[in-house]
Amino acid sequence: MSARILLPVKAHIKKYLTVQFGPEMAISDIGTIPMLLFLMLEKHKKADPGVVKPNQRLIDDKKYFGYKVYIGDKYQESRGLYLSREKIIRFNESIDNMMREDMFRFCQSPGENNDHVVDYNINRFREFYGIWEDELPFDNLKRWYYRERIRLEEHLRVEKRYEPQMELIF
């Protein structure tokens, strides 16, 4: 018997997932985000009745909104339906980071829609996903963009000597 759960996610993450997957996402072992959720699933602990619905408090919080997730019979039997509070928070952080990396690639892309002005590209990215200022501030994204760019430039500048530990001879 398949199941549908409401996954507590932040507002901008819900909009990102809605654009990527639609109003409901199906968990599978293919794809980055569905596979991440698949690996986070656990079976309910029958000995402790407190873990049956512990995550409803996150949805009642004003920061989190429910996103529909479909779990098929095969995955429900093998993995379960339970997600701990810590795993839900980690999932939100992971998707937020993934979204920011998408924004960085969007700003760096050489396409015709690129203005080569970071501010316009960040605003265009936010408009595409429908993310409002109070959900994810522009200044926050811009600071993150410049920090990430500096981090990547420093990483590319440092030349490391590569010495193989083992050589395969054919």
Image: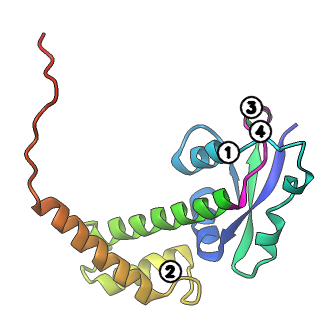
- Position of 149 with respect to 121 (left or right) is left
Tag 1: amino acid: Ile
Indicate which label's residue lies in the foreground, 3 or 1.
Answer: 3
Disc 4 target residue: 72
Numbered mark located on residue 27 in the image = 1
Pointers 4 and 1 in contact (C-beta within 8 Å): yes
Magenta segment: does it hold 151? no
Residue where numbered disc 3 is placed: 78
Of badges 3 and 2, the one in the foreground is: 3
Residue 93 or residue 45, whichever sits in front: 45
- Which secondary structure is most common in the magenta stretch? loop
User: Which of disc 2 and disc 3 is earlier in sequence?
Assistant: 3
Q: Secondary structure at mark 1?
A: loop
Task: Choose the circle earlier in sequence order: 4 or 3.
Answer: 4
Residue 80 falls inside the magenta stretch: yes
Disc 3 + disc 1, Cβ < 8 Å: no
Q: Nearer the viewer, residue 110 or 40?
A: 40
- Residue 17's place in the image compared with 133, above or below, is above
Report, in whole angstroms, how far the alpha carbon at label 3 lies from the one at label 1: 13 Å
| Horizontal relation, residue 29 to residue 83: left or right | left
Where residue 125 sits, quadrant-wise, is: bottom left
Single out the mark in the foreground, 4 or 2: 4
* Residue plotted at (63% across, 49% down): 37
N-terminal-most mark, 3 or 1: 1
